[in-house]
């Protein structure tokens, strides 16, 4: 873990960036508009060829909370996030991709629930939004989840998750593997014992469903999930099949 003050309320927002210039303003501005203003936005450019990095640089010139790291060659989202985590200075770490965005009270509400519940990890509900702006549905996870419950479904949307480095005892690392977000939160919830939901009047985050996204290939996603159960979690074939069935059913429920 990088050097972090033992107290304080600073939140480090990790954002990997790769050729997302046309989506970028809304995510960045949703961070800077947070009602909890003690934050830094750490953007790691992963070898973009568009003007996204320059756009972030413009924001950084006007707001000292924005930090741009030009990463050189494209190494993938896991490496970009890990690099940002290493540079993060806040006690709390959270994630936002360069095409998703937040409710203005997202961070404030999550910090409140972390303190009230003395928890290390919090998450929230989120809205799935089509590229054209249409609402595809709201994903409302349980009020609390354990590692076992996470095996049934990825209850922590990556754009909603936040963790307290002090309570957790360090950081997690993203692996270069399919469903890297899910693997990351599985491990952190295992370490923490449980994670809790922060509630708002509605969703606290908004997830853009882009056409042709990596996760849209259902057969490939199923192979990734099987590999996670067998190789990452070390489960036997019967247990893996059991959790695969539940995971598939819950994934369909998120898309209603």
Image (cartoon, helix red, strand yellow):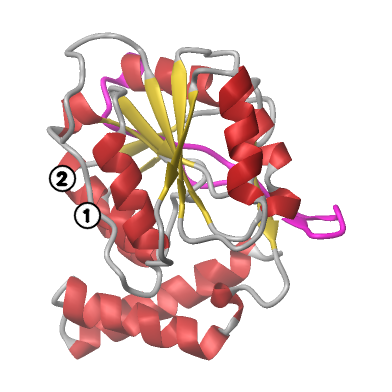
Which residue position holds label 1?
A: 187
Q: Nearer the viewer, residue 134 or 48?
A: 48
Q: Position of residue 208 (x, y in %)?
A: 69, 55
Q: Give yes or no for residue 120 being in the magenta stretch.
A: yes
Marks 2,1: beta carbons within 8 A: yes
Residue 101 shows in this picture: no
Which residue position holds label 2?
A: 191
Position of 14 relative to 165 (above/below): below
Position of 161 relative to 182 (above/below): above
Q: Position of residue 92 (x, y in %)?
A: 33, 26
Q: Give yes or no for residue 101 being in the magenta stretch.
A: no
Which range of residues does the magenta coloring cover?
116-142
Cα distance between the residues tagged 2 and 1: 6 Å
- Left or right: residue 173 versus residue 224 is left
Write the residue at 16% across / 85% down: 236
- Left or right: residue 37 versus residue 155 is right
Element under disc 2: helix
Q: How many marks?
A: 2
Place residue 237 in its image quadrant: bottom left
Place residue 90 in its image quadrant: top left
Write the residue at 71% across / 64% down: 256
């Amino acid at each position: 873990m990088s050097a972090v003050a033992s107290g304080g309320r600073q939140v480090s927002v990790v954002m990997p960036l790769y050729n997302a210039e046309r989506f970028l303003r809304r995510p960045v501005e949703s961070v800077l508009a947070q009602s909890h203003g003690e934050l830094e936005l750490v953007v790691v450019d992963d070898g973009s060829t568009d003007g996204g990095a320059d756009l972030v640089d413009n924001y950084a010139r006007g707001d000292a909370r924005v930090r741009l790291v030009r990463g050189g060659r494209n190494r993938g989202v896991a490496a970009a996030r890990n690099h940002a985590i290493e540079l993060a200075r806040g006690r709390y770490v959270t994630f936002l991709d360069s095409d998703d965005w937040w409710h203005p009270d997202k961070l404030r509400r999550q910090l409140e629930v972390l303190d009230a519940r003395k928890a290390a990890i919090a998450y929230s509900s989120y809205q799935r939004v089509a590229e054209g702006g249409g609402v595809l549905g709201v994903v409302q996870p349980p009020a609390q989840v354990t590692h076992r419950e996470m095996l049934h479904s990825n209850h922590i949307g990556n754009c909603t998750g936040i963790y307290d480095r002090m309570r957790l005892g360090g950081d997690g690392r993203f692996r270069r593997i399919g469903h890297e977000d899910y693997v990351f939160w599985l491990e952190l919830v295992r370490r923490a014992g449980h994670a809790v939901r922060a509630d708002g009047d509605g969703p606290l985050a908004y997830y853009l469903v882009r056409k042709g996204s990596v996760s849209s290939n259902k057969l490939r996603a199923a192979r990734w999930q099987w590999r996670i159960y067998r190789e990452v979690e070390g489960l036997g074939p019967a247990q893996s099949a059991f959790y695969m069935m539940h995971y598939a059913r819950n994934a369909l429920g998120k898309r209603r």
